[in-house]
Amino acid sequence: MSSLTHAIERYAELAVSVGINVQPGQTLVIQAPLYNAEFVRLIAKKAYEAGAKNVQVEWDDDELKRMKYMMAPDEAFEEYPAWKAQGYVEMAGNDAAFLTVYSPTPDLLRDVKPERLAAASKAYGTAMREYRAMMQAGRISWAIVSAPSPAWARKVFPDASPEDAERLLWEHLLRAARAYEEHPVEAWRQHLERLRGHVERMNAKRYARLIYRSPGTELSVDLPPDHQWVAGGIHNAKGTFFVPNIPTEELFTLPHRDSVNGTVSSTMPLNWNGQLIDKFSLTFEHGLVTSCTAETGLEALQRLIATDPGAARLGEVALVPQDSPISNMKVLFYNTGLDENASCHFALGNAYPLCLKDGSSMSREELDARGANFSIVHVDFMIGSDQLDIDGVLQDGTVEPVFRSGNWA
């Protein structure tokens, strides 16, 4: 067995044992592209070996997706199958776990009308609202891992042959996931422990506000009094520990919905629904985006912000040092799940209730009263660089450095 093949098998094991943490008798639902069928079969094998009762796979196909966007009538993008949305709610209610194998084709929908993408995103978000609420509150186990596709590999490594590009992408994904370590599960245990140390320090500070400064960015972000930082993994409603993102390097919490002011500029492209938005900025007043610019994808950005009232407000604040494994690879992945773990970032849209003390058990009205944002979208965008400074303002008004030149101060 080659070292690459062996590492891919370890990666599948990490997805099952560290990411989802499949329990005996549990159903695992996998959403994956057809191209990654071999990797999905390996994950399924690991899941059954861990005691899974059933592995159900929902296949995606980029060619069919593009065909629909180019050929279907407009009304096709204004609906989402109710039976499918309800099925996810029922499976979640029966303690199923959900794994996504993500393999983007960055330019797949480049020529699609932005209004179609926006309509489809809104229809999906509306139909899946109940399931997504369970997921974002941390009540169910879910995880995302990435695997190569030919188109994605060519985008990331355009100067390599198709075969070399795919191999290179696999190698980078496996290094990011610590699958090349001699004992990957133990390496993850140590990594999660380090992240917990940062969480404990940030939660002890109880910062009232964070102030961001870098080229094109001058932004203040208030944090709710009972916010809490989260990193690595969480416990679901049944007490099972899971890690939603493999890899993960971030600490995140939620901002106060109405207290974000200033301008922030992106430092990496955003791949949103198959369209690239690049070199963009957002200006906020009292939490609301009042203006935006973009060198590429401005119309898509505008439609994202207009999805619903909450899409024009921040729902997440995340800290990632520049001196981290993914950032040090110096590779732009065109994949938010990876790029967000190489850079400090924000997210437009819905806030995670688990970022408030006891938030996972709060009603929407209680969350709203504490400043949590609500939206059918949650879209991360990267703002970190080696020129980013972040200050923290303590409850007594004292200002102290949190990040300097992109790293922990």
Image: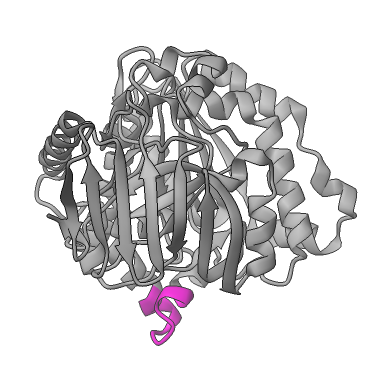
Q: Is residue 158 magenta?
A: yes
Write the residue at 55% across / 52% down.
Answer: 33
Image location of residue 27, percent across then percent down = 47, 22
Q: Toward which corner of the image does residue 107 lie, by quadrant? A: bottom right
Please state the extent of the stretch shown in magenta in the rendering. Answer: 154-165
Instruction: Tell me: residue 364, above or below residue 219.
Output: above
Q: Is residue 37 left or right of residue 220?
A: right
- The vertical placement of 343 against 25, above or below, is below
Which of 222/383 is in front?
222
Which residue occupies the foreground of this view, 41 or 77?
77
Indicate the position of residue 252 as horizontal and vertical percent values.
32, 40
- Left or right of residue 69, residue 151 in this image: left
The verdict on residue 315 being magenta is no
Front residue of this view, candidates 92 and 340: 340
Colouring method of the image: one colour
Q: Can you give x and y, in whole percent of width and height, for residue 172 in the image?
A: 28, 65
**Could you tell me which quadrant the N terminus lies in?**
bottom left
- Which residue sits at x=25%, y=70%? 387
Does residue 2 appear in this view? no
Residue lying farthest bottom?
Answer: 159
- For image coordinates 63% across by 70% down, the residue present is 297
Q: Residue at x 58, y 52 (%)?
A: 289
* Location of residue 84 in the rendering, given as x and y in whole percent from the top left corner: 69, 29
**Quadrant of the drawing holding the C terminus:** bottom left
Residue 277 appears in the rendering: yes
- 197 left or right of 313 in image: left
Residue 26 sits above or below residue 69 on the image: above
Q: How many marks?
A: 0
